[in-house]
Image: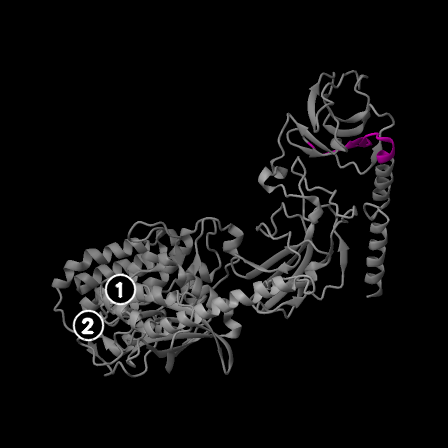
Amino acid sequence: MGGCLWLHTLLWSLTASSIPLIPRSLDDLSTQLLQSKWEMNGNRLCKLCDATSTSCNGEHGCDSKCMVTTSCEYPEEVCAAIWRKNNGTITIETRCHDPKLELYGHKLDDFNSDRCVMKKKESPGETLYMCSCLEEECNSQLLFSDVTDTHHTVSQERTLHKPSTGEILFDSKGEISTKQSMPDGRIILHALCKFCDEEQTTCRTETECKSNCTITSICEKPGEVCAAIWRKNDANITLETICHDPRLELYGHMLYDYNSSKCVMREKKMIGETIYMCSCKEEECNNVIFFTEETETNIDWKNDFPKVVLISLLPPIGIAIAVIFSFYCYRVHRKNKISKKWEKDTKCTRHPNMDCSDACAIMMDDDRSDISSTCANNLNHNTELLPIELDILVGKGRFAEVYKAKLKQNTSEQFETVAVKIFPYEEYASWKMEKDIFSDINLKHENVLQFLTAEERKTDVGKQYWLITAFHCNGNLQEYLAKHIISWEDLWKLGGSLSRGVAHLHSDHTPCGRPKTPIVHRDLKSSNILVKNDLTCCLCDFGLSIWLDPSLSVDDLANSGQVGTARYMAPEVLESRINLENVESFKQTDVYSMALVLWEITSRCNAIGDVKDYEPPFGTKVREHPCVESMKDNVLRDRGRPEISNSWLSHQGIQLVCETITECWDHDPEARLTSQCVAERFNEMEHLDRLSERSCSEEKIPEDCSEDTTI
């Protein structure tokens, strides 16, 4: 602590005595002394180094990498540089030069330039380029054939206003200026920042925190600002503090908040982890990081008291009156308006064949893809928490619990049934991933679970994260198949709707032709598929899904990890050999999993003859919850797949389904059908349902929709 105090005292004393920069080395001290000399005698400052080997190939702009700055001996001298290539050896020399004299037998007539632009000169037995220029130390950067250094080009719009503000400034060449002055004439020093590598931290995104970094560093280059990076990956949370040039990307992102006095965190998109970054220009401002920006107000209460009274009291009084009136109108009319709007747009009527009071839910299970869209949009834009009463627990997974719940619709005490998926505080990342996927308007489809809204709630047990969706009393497909024997018509409806849902995820456009980013589910299984009242499927549980964004690199895809349920993993996932160069490979892992689900559906169809009790894929060959190594033995070593008996092939429709299944679980991903092709095959099977007897599904276990179900 004493060291930091001593450092600050030294910095202030040097600033007050008009010393422009603190020397970090003998070279810096030399440069400062030369600067003072130049200011006294008016001679030009130039880089001065003898011929030194360089990797500059003469095709682009180069840095001379000369660390010595000199004040030229005569006022008429300018800066010059000489680049030579002789027998494979390349050297650069920098010096002062009188343009009236020849240099190595050549006159330099370009000395009026503000940049050192290399011109080729005739020289036997070697390649020779030379340049000269007027600006201070302009022979530090060499340009060949007048190449524009686009990396440092800055538009006029980006040039900031006055240097008295202490902000990061850019000079006429687009370089960050080192001459940043305060109103009293003092020179601003290079930034002082906290500088520590990634360290474990207990900092959470709901609060402000200290970095706990004990190292303070003077930034190496003028114009650098302080920055901080917060990461959450699996169970690890780390914080890194550094100096950073705001013209360059940091971990693939530009930071535009570097003129701030505080380090206010902004979330950045990163596959496989949560990352926040910030930058700021005050001394050691990255020591404290903020996840919510507070408004700073500096008021002189003594001099500005009348103005404070007018600004602070009169507007709030008027606003309070308006808010009270608006709130009254809102409370009176809100619920009635929502009820009427839903009644008009959704036309949600109860299923005539269901014997349960809550089978309708928010969205009816019919063929229209736009049902309840207005309801969902209204809820999703509502800033208040919805009036929801949790009923019973209907499902529990690795990350969340699912409840059947009641949503109050209007003042007449009527309720609609919804599903609420509740994530604990520790699973914020899983909740956010699924919320972001659901919030994509292009995800909407009749065979994808309808999303209503997402909420953050404070409860007696702590903070929770909720996803509110439509409720389907038939539960998930695994439970439905365990309780029912289905007909050929049911198989066609369940399989066709499943394939259409997966095809919609994988497609790069919506049914109406609007462009969309393809999505891979990555955990497709019968327990993540819901059965609607019309016996069609809808996909749910997108916690492990990813967007196949064209901007994703191979490294981004490689970091997405080996995820999913081992029983349903494709061979290439089990073996960790997905072709990262082709995003279609990720889609084909979903197709393999879909084939296993289609096998489950087919195994419960009465059109195949005797129907056995329900078994998941691979049945008793593996444990109830097999591990990856166990599935490797069955799928990779033995090339095993669930059994398709000869009796299944006696029905024309079942035979086509089995052929499709076999092509979808092929060991070679490139040999598998696409999800779009599977959907087209099921569409072509529509006429085959006339061959069946259209027998109703047989219930193996009688059930009531009001009993426990799952989403």
For label 2, the SS is: helix
Q: Where's residue 562, x and y in %?
A: 49, 62
Quadrant where the N terminus is found in the figure: bottom right
Residue type pointed to by label 1: Ile
Residue 524 drawn at (x, y percent): 37, 65
| Residue furthest to the front | 306
Q: Is residue 490 magenta?
A: no
Color encoding of the figure: one colour
Q: Nearer the viewer, residue 521 or 682?
A: 521
Task: Note whether 631 is above or below 483 in the view shown.
Answer: above
Pointer 1 residue: 371
Q: Residue at x 25, y 54 (%)?
A: 680
The one nearer the camera, 105 or 488, is 105
Q: Nearer the viewer, residue 39 or 377?
A: 39
Indicate yes or no whether the magenta region holds residue 51.
yes
Q: Is residue 292 visible?
A: no
Residue 173 falls in image quadrant? top right
Q: Position of residue 660 (x, y in %)?
A: 27, 58
Circle 1 packing at 10 Å, graded few (<14), some (14-19), many (20+), is many
Q: CA distance from mark 2 to mark 1?
A: 32 Å
- As displayed, is residue 550 above or below residue 373? above
In the rendered view, tell whether residue 553 sits above or below residue 67.
below
Helix, strand, or loop for circle 1?
loop
Q: Amino acid at mark 2?
A: Asn
Please report the residue visible at 62 percent of the width from the left and 41 percent of the height from the top.
Answer: 159
Q: Residues within 10 Å of mark 2 (few under 14, many from 20)?
A: some
Q: Which mark is residue 606?
A: 2
Which of 311/441 is in front? 311
Query: Range of the magenta residues?
Result: 38-56
